[in-house]
Image: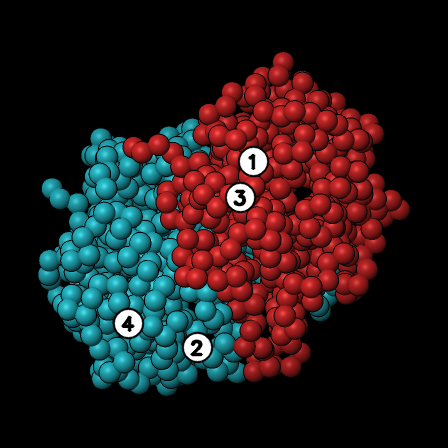
Chain colours: A cyan, B red
């Protein structure tokens, strides 16, 4: 494979996070390195009747900081989070969007779209009848509306999409957005995801699929990937959007490059609707594809930000997948962290949030920890689990995301030399 | 850069109000069969609009096992049927490991029936009565995931959710996946089953549904002066896309080539289209440029034609911008939604399939119900009422979605090389 030319390379030049770890890149990254958990009892609604009563909520977020009151009223919280994250990403990138931004697009994903609006509207329909449904209900519910609002708010007139693969959604969003740039259809893409599913029905329905932690008396200790005592994921919410740019143009405008999205692999398990393949075969294949697509030496992988949601089956199969893809010997020295221990499972936003943390790890040459990993499950042996943050050389880092339905996505994020 | 991989269409699977399977649907399309009718067999309560374009010919048990037929959403049922029909039409055998083939399907909202049912159960009987399948079977990505599971596809698999442009974006993105070398074949299309009380009420609140209750067959009238909105349609359409070398190596029958895809955003308004047509024109231009054809080569456009007051004129304006007034006036345009209704996330794929068939078959489907052309929609050669024969050197299918998504696809005939 011939080396890619600069105009075929895609770099991250801005990061916008509205997350349980904090608002803004700096705060969120500091919290991640400090191993701080954003978990607590659910406050968005009365969850006392629910099986899972804890969550990672975004604290201190006022949509009106980013969106005018009239527009904000016509958006679901999932769009608030996206528009705010986009504002932060654009600011972080020092990006000036021209008035006729035909070469600027967006791929913003989600798992569920406007949950709160859906629940209100459907309840209204059942209790008060069809003529009481608001004309803005449908647009506020549909999954692509966060992308629509971001494009309207910042005048992005290029390709505009929302790819949806459950919990892998925003990793696919980043991968597809990078491909849109690579194939010449845009120069700059805002890519990522948003999710606001801490709502009565979404939480109850997720819990019904029996994948959530019920450690309600210990919110901070509940999300414990790879730990022998793990009992499921803890729901989070977030907006996480990255600015991706064609590398030659980013250099031309003297942008600060955080890292390069050098590879992307997408595969499907074709195995089971909620369970991962126990050996992680197709997850391994996604890792191989991500490395091969960028011509990256597998031996250069120094860090993996794991999907690791803290479920029994998922965490173990993921470690197997890493070992299968990279070999047992190399896997042993790879620093693996599961940042969901600190920010929870933000569903459609989680991949972009984790990709942001992976890019920051590459930029800072520092690995965030997996917290709550007190007693490593033997089924998760075979990689170097990071329990406290540390500085180390990271040439290539992988960020993995897997979704209900068997969707696997892996990004290979590389350091860009001086 | 290495030369661009070429992508061809080798199979079509369709299920919609026009019929089940490629032949059935195409025959009824060319015949100009209206599908608008009073809603029958779906519980819609006191919905304010009581007509739609239902896929009455679809028998779920013909395509889906009993367990999934009972538990999974109608959105997924349609997808499985279209996927199986498409594979059979392409005579494509999936390899043992399945890694060369993926699936991208558009949808507007995923498994509505499953979600509404479980939300109702929660409200009436409590949080612990929700089905464990409530989330997996209502997710927008369940249709492509289930198609991948049932057919053994292990390549890139995802849902594309760009409202009414989703089916077209799914087809275009699938072609891109093949071009970049991530798959040799893709099942690409869309599926939706949005004839539900919530969406009827939601669309009606937006004033986008036709209220012509006394004339369901004549309710959807794109470009007509008396148009008053669309009827909700339902169904799925899936194309088998293949890398050219892969298709020829296995001796596949090539239906046509997918030569270009363009996408753009209005960045204008959540529900209203860009009235100038400039935004839609950008998507069309990008698709034509990727295809390497001249705008003057476009002989047919399958329009989005949602029969909305502001939408139809803005779409014609876009065509005139792209083609120029002289060529636009002689370019055949039809809106097949007049027959099959607005199939939401499936509609772009269904219309792409009909465009493919127009190119391959040399016949252009009509816009039915177009009696009195709105002067604001003049300037193109509307195919009014009856199909016509035409040898096409390129055809365009265009779609627009709520939120400001525009997508366009260019298909060219396959001439043996």
The chain carrying label 1 is B
In the image, is B314 to the left or to the right of A114?
right
In the image, is A243 to the left or to the right of B26?
left
Q: CA distance from mark 4 to mark 2?
A: 20 Å
Please say if B142 is above or below B299. below
For image coordinates 63% across by 13% down, the residue present is: B326
Taking depth in this image into account, of B17 and A228 the one nearest to the observer is B17
For image coordinates 71% across by 38% down, the residue present is: B336
Can you identify the residue that label 4 sits on? A320
Residue mark closest to the camera, 4 vs 2 = 4
Please say if A391 is above or below A178. below
The chain carrying label 3 is B
In the image, is B242 to the left or to the right of A321?
right
For image coordinates 27% across by 71% down, the residue present is: A319
Q: Residue furthest top?
A: B326
Secondary structure under tag 1 reads strand
Can you identify the residue that label 2 sits on? A211
The chain carrying label 4 is A
Q: Residues within 10 Å of mark 2 (few under 14, many from 20)?
A: many
Can you identify the residue that label 3 sits on? B252
């Amino acid at each position: 494979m011939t080396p890619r030319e600069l105009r075929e390379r895609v770099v991250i030049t801005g990061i916008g996070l509205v997350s349980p770890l904090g608002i803004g890149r700096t705060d969120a990254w500091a919290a991640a390195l400090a191993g701080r958990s954003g978990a607590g009892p659910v406050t968005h609604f009365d969850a006392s009747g629910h099986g899972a009563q804890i969550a990672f909520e975004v604290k201190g977020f006022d949509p009106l900081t980013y969106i005018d009151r009239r527009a904000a009223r016509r958006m679901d919280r999932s769009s608030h989070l996206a528009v705010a994250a986009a504002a932060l990403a654009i600011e972080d990138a020092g990006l000036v969007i021209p008035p006729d931004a035909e070469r600027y697009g967006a791929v913003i994903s989600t798992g569920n779209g406007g949950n709160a609006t859906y629940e209100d509207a459907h309840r209204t329909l059942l209790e008060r009848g069809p003529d009481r449904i608001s004309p803005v209900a449908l647009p506020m519910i549909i999954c692509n509306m966060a992308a629509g609002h971001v494009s309207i708010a910042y005048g992005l007139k290029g390709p505009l999409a929302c790819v949806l693969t459950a919990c892998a959604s925003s990793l696919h969003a980043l991968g597809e957005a990078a491909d849109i740039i690579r194939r010449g259809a845009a120069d700059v893409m805002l890519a990522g995801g948003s999710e606001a599913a801490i709502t009565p029905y979404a939480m109850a329905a997720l819990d019904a699929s029996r994948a959530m932690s019920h450690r309600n008396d210990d919110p901070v200790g509940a999300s414990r990937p790879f730990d022998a005592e793990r009992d499921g994921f803890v729901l989070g919410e977030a907006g996480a959007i990255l600015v991706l740019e064609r590398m030659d143009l980013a250099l031309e405008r003297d942008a600060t490059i955080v890292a390069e999205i050098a590879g992307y692999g997408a595969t499907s398990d074709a195995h089971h609707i909620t369970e991962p393949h126990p050996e992680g075969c197709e997850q391994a294949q996604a890792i191989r594809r991500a490395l091969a697509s960028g011509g990256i030496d597998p031996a250069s992988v120094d860090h993996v930000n794991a999907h690791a949601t803290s479920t029994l089956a998922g965490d173990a199969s993921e470690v197997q997948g890493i070992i299968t893809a990279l070999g047992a010997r190399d896997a042993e020295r790879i620093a693996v962290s599961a940042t969901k221990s600190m920010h929870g499972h933000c569903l459609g936003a989680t991949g972009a949030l984790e990709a942001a943390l992976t890019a920051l790890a590459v930029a800072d040459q520092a690995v965030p920890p997996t917290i709550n990993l007190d007693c490593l499950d033997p089924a998760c042996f075979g990689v170097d689990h990071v329990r406290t943050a540390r500085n180390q050389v990271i040439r290539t880092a992988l960020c993995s995301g897997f979704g209900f339905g068997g969707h696997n996505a892996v990004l290979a994020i590389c350091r860009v030399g001086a | 850069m290495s030369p661009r991989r070429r992508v061809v269409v080798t199979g079509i699977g369709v299920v919609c109000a026009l019929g089940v399977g490629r032949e059935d649907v195409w025959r009824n399309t060319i015949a100009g069969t209206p599908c608008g009718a009073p809603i029958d067999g779906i519980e819609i309560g006191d919905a304010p609009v009581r007509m739609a374009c239902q896929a009455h010919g679809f028998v779920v048990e013909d395509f889906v096992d009993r367990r999934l037929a009972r538990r999974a959403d109608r959105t997924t049922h349609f997808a499985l049927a279209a996927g199986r029909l498409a594979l059979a039409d392409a005579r494509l055998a999936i390899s043992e490991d399945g890694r060369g083939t993926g699936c991208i399907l558009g949808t507007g909202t995923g498994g509505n029936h499953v979600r509404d049912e479980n939300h109702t159960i929660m409200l009436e009987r409590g949080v612990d009565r929700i089905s464990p399948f409530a989330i997996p079977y209502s997710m927008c990505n369940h249709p492509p995931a289930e198609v991948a599971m049932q057919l053994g596809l292990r390549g890139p698999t995802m849902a594309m959710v760009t409202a009414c442009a989703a089916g077209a974006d799914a087809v275009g993105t699938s072609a891109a996946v093949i071009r970049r070398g991530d798959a040799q074949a893709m099942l690409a299309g869309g599926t939706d089953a949005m004839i539900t009380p919530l969406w009827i009420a939601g669309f009606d609140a937006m004033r986008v549904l036709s209220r012509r209750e006394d004339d369901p067959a004549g309710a959807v009238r794109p470009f007509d002066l008396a148009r008053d909105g669309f009827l909700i349609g339902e169904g799925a359409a899936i194309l088998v896309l293949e890398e050219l070398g892969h298709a020829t190596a296995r001796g596949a029958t090539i239906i046509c080539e997918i030569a270009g895809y363009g996408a753009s955003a209005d960045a204008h308004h959540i529900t209203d289209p860009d009235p100038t047509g400039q935004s839609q024109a950008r998507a069309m231009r990008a698709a034509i440029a990727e295809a390497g054809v001249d705008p003057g080569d476009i002989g047919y456009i399958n329009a989005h034609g949602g029969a909305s007051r502001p939408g139809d004129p803005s779409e014609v304006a876009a065509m005139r911008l792209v083609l120029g007034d002289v060529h636009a006036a002689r370019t055949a345009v039809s809106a097949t939604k007049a027959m099959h209704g607005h199939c939401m996330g499936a509609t772009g794929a269904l219309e792409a399939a009909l465009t493919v068939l127009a190119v391959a078959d040399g016949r252009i489907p009509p816009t039915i119900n177009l009696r009195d052309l709105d002067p604001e929609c003049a300037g193109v050669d509307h195919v009014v009422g009856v199909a016509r024969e035409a040898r096409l050197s390129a055809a365009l299918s265009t779609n627009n979605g709520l939120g400001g998504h525009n997508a366009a696809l260019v298909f060219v005939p396959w001439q043996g090389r």
